[in-house]
Each structure stands twice: as C-alpha cells, then as structure tokens.
C-alpha cells in the first residue's frame, strides 16, 4: 500500500434535490472532469463534521448542517489500485439553492434523486446502487 487517506463526502439536499459537482479536468485525478458527490480529504487533527462543512463551503459556497452518517467504506484507487481510502458519506442539509462552483469544481447542479446516478461518475453511481445503506438513503429521498 503506497498511501492511505480518509475522504469525506456530502450528499447535500435542499427542497427535494441533491447537489452534484463536476471536477475540473485534471489528467492525473481519478474523476477529473466528471460529476461526483462533493467532498474532500480529512487532514490530521480535524473533526470530521468540521471537514465536511469546510469542504462543502470551499466547493459550493454553501453552509450546511451535517445531519447523519450515511455510510462508511474502504476502497482502492489509483491507476493500479495500490492506494487505499476510508470514505465517510454524510447527509447534509443546505439552507438554500445558491450553490456556486468553487475550489476544484467547474460546475454544480441540483438534481432529482431519481436522476442522481445518471449524473455521477461510474464509481460513485455504482456505490449508490450497490451499497445497501447508500441505496436505501437515496430511495428515501425519491
């Protein structure tokens, strides 16, 4: 294993919709140019909920309330699958629809939960349909 990281993701909801973000195209990023669930990396000595709030604010300009942990999982990434991550997926509630792409996003869009997997990169769409807790959460939103 070359490295390990903890990733926090935010399923942001407001008025029945979910916010997705499109990464700027970066050739070395595994989801460069693709749509994904906003989030980022946990740094040493950061509280998890604080990181979720910070990453959402940096990427979307929104202030959110962290509502609940939806799922926790590990996965391999990188071109050869030699890097491992722990991903924590949180449900967050936004106070408004006034999201704007920031940080490393080129666009954001509010989508209906029934269309969520059609927007997302294959990896995240697969997790939302195959991981029982994620699938159940999205079904409840629909």
Image (spheres, helix red, strand yellow):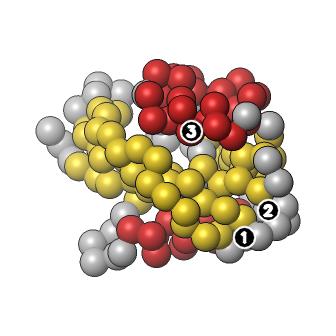
Of mark 2 and mark 3, the one earlier in the sequence is 2
Q: Which mark is residue 121?
A: none
Q: Which mark is residue 137?
A: 3
Eyeballing the image, is 47 above or below 52?
below
Front-most of residues 90 and 121: 90
Q: Looking at the rendering, which quadrant does residue 31 occupy?
A: top right
What separation in Å lies between label 1 and label 2 (alpha carbons)? 6 Å
Q: Residue at x 61, y 64 (%)?
A: 56
Residue 123 x, y percent position in the rendering: 50, 27
Eyeballing the image, is 119 above or below 12?
above
Q: Residue at x 57, y 27 (%)?
A: 125
Front-most of residues 13 and 3: 13
Q: Looking at the rendering, which quadrant does residue 81 occupy?
A: top left
Could you classify mark 3 by the number of other residues whose Cα lies within 10 Å: few (under 14), some (14-19), or many (20 or more)? some
Of mark 1 and mark 2, the one earlier in the sequence is 1
What separation in Å lies between label 2 and label 3 (alpha carbons)? 22 Å
């Amino acid at each position: 294993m070359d490295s390990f990281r903890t990733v926090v993701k935010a399923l942001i909801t407001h008025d029945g919709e979910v916010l997705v973000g499109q990464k700027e195209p970066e050739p070395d990023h595994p989801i460069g140019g693709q749509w994904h669930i906003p989030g980022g990396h946990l740094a040493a000595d950061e509280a998890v909920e604080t990181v979720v709030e910070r990453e959402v604010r940096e990427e979307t300009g929104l202030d959110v309330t962290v509502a609940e942990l939806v799922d926790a999982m590990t996965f391999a990434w990188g071109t050869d699958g030699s890097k491992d991550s722990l991903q924590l997926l949180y449900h967050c509630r936004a106070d408004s629809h006034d999201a704007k792409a920031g940080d490393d996003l080129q666009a954001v869009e509010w989508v209906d939960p029934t269309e969520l997997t059609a927007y997302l990169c294959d990896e995240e769409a697969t997790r939302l349909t195959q991981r029982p807790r994620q699938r159940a959460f999205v079904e409840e939103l629909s």
